[in-house]
Amino acid sequence: MSEKDYRATYLTSLGIQSRKTEILDIHADEIDLEKIRHYLLVTPSSKLNNRVLIWQFLLGITPPYKTVRLHTQEQLYEQWSVIENAARLILSLSSDHEVTQYLYALHLIQTGQLSLMNDKHDITCGNPDIDKCNVLLVKNILLFLKSLKLSEQYFIIHEILVLLSSVNKQDLVVQQIVTKISHTDSSLAKKFHSKEVKRVLLTLVRTCFVKALPLCCFGRLMDNVIAKRDASCLVSIGVEIVMKNSVINRSSAPADLAEEIKSTILVTQPHQSCLSNFVSKSY
């Protein structure tokens, strides 16, 4: 099967019409959200010149109607001022601080997750694992937002973290990964039921495989999550990354397996073949 036929079959299985991508007028008076969602899913990464603007539309930051965009921008500016003032008062933070930590702090303040323990003004939600994952995510997402103002960067970061917050609250996605891996290779079934292994997999999912994926793959993963507004794609990618790593298949003890996941997936890039398939064929 050719790559073109593979892509058409894949999109059809997702319920997406595999039609020729139309020219997208991103500055039109009225934006068809379904049209730009389709455009985001089927357009090759190298041709996504309007990726960030499309993200803003699909995340609800920029309204699809030109007549209300100016009013929305004014509201966001007022909201930004309030959040910044809160950061100065609560954490003595200003935009002079390191941008990743600063934007994450603003997100915690806006969502009411900021945890001030023992009068220490730490930037934390009270869960170090989630903090570490979210900061890593913010750092990577910012690589796509370099051309934007700080306030514009923040609202995209905030909406993506809110979208992915369900991953922080439960390990359902991880359990799905474990189940699919067990069905694929029954010899691995017992290994993936260790709490330690599940914790490492949950770290991978929470960070959307930041360190395991090249930037281009991470960008396409974000496209998928934002377009579909869920993290279901993390299951198939998690299975693919884990199963393609031959070192994991040789592990015996759960503790060893967890350590090898950390050392081989979180530190080095796994086989490029499965990742290139994810970028070029799945979209």
Image (tube, grey):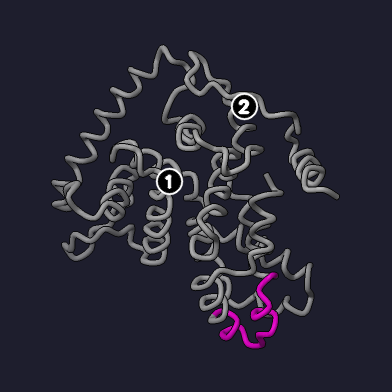
Q: Quadrant of the C terminus?
A: top right
The image position of residue 226, as x and y in percent, is 54, 41
Specify the quadrant of the image occupied by residue 44: top right
From this view, report whether residue 95 is shown above or below residue 174: above
Nearer to the camera, 12 or 5: 5
Residue 266 is labelled as none
- Residue at left 33%, top 62%? 126
The image position of residue 82, as x and y in percent, is 21, 35
Mark 1: give few (<14), some (14-19) or many (20+) Cα within 10 Å. some
Nearer to the camera, 202 or 218: 218
Amino acid marked by disc 2: Glu
Specify the quadrant of the image occupied by residue 62: top left
Span of residues in magenta: 244-258
Specify the quadrant of the image occupied by residue 18: top right
- Residue at left 49%, top 21%? 64
Q: Main secondary structure of the magenta part?
A: helix
The image position of residue 119, as x and y in percent, is 16, 62
- Under tag 1, what secondary structure? loop
Is 255 contained in the magenta span?
A: yes
> Which residue, given by chain and number where applicable, does mark 1 sit on?
144
> Which residue, given by chain and number where applicable, does mark 2 sit on?
34
Q: Count how many numbered circles sit on residues in the image.
A: 2
- Residue at left 34%, top 37%? 148
Is 246 contained in the magenta span?
A: yes
The image position of residue 36, as x and y in percent, is 58, 29
| First in residue order: circle 1 vs circle 2 | 2
> Position of 233 compared to 49: left or right?
right
- Residue at left 66%, top 54%? 278
From this view, report whether residue 7 is shown above or below residue 189: above
